[in-house]
Amino acid sequence: MNSFAERLAFLMKKHNMSQAELGRRIQVKRQTIQHILSADVKNSKLLFDIATVFNVNETWLATGNGSMYPSSKELPVL
């Protein structure tokens, strides 16, 4: 997976989540998700929200570097 869009598409497929559902969860239109997936967007101001929905590491989602899932050290203590 070389791009942000490929990693996002992978996560959506893995979680069986539609563009509309992801859009609803991060409060944007489906067309916004479609644009991210099709326009070879390098990054997105929605990165944090998307990473939160899928509980993945922001750095991995943006760049493909590092671990897909945040380490326990990165998780907030509630």
Image (tube, helix red, strand yellow):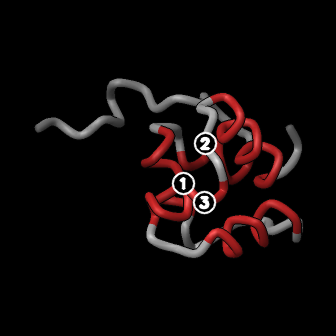
Write down the quadrant of residue 71 in the picture. top left
The residue that mark 1 highlights is: 21
Between residue 21 and residue 69, name the one nearer to us. 21
* Crowding near the residue tagged with mark 2, few <14, some 14–19, many ≥20 C-alpha atoms within 10 Å: few
The residue that mark 2 highlights is: 17
Q: Identify the residue at image location x=46%, y=32%.
A: 70
In the rendered structure, the answer to whether residue 45 lies left or right of residue 25 reads right
The residue that mark 3 highlights is: 20
Residue 13 location (% of width, % of height)? 71, 35
Query: Hey, what amino acid is under mark 1?
Result: Glu
Residue 55 location (% of width, % of height)? 45, 37
What kind of element bears circle 2? Answer: loop
* Crowding near the residue tagged with mark 3, few <14, some 14–19, many ≥20 C-alpha atoms within 10 Å: some
What kind of element bears circle 3? Answer: helix
Q: Is the C-beta separation of discs 1 and 3 under 8 Å? A: yes
Q: Is the C-beta separation of discs 1 and 2 under 8 Å? A: yes
Residue 18 location (% of width, % of height)? 65, 49
What kind of element bears circle 1? Answer: helix
* Crowding near the residue tagged with mark 1, few <14, some 14–19, many ≥20 C-alpha atoms within 10 Å: some
Between residue 73 and residue 32, name the one nearer to us. 32
Residue 73 location (% of width, % of height)? 33, 29
Q: Identify the residue at image location x=34%, y=24%.
A: 72
Query: Hey, what amino acid is under mark 2?
Result: Met
In the rendered structure, the answer to whether residue 60 lies left or right of residue 71 reads right
In the rendered structure, the answer to whether residue 77 lies left or right of residue 46 reads left
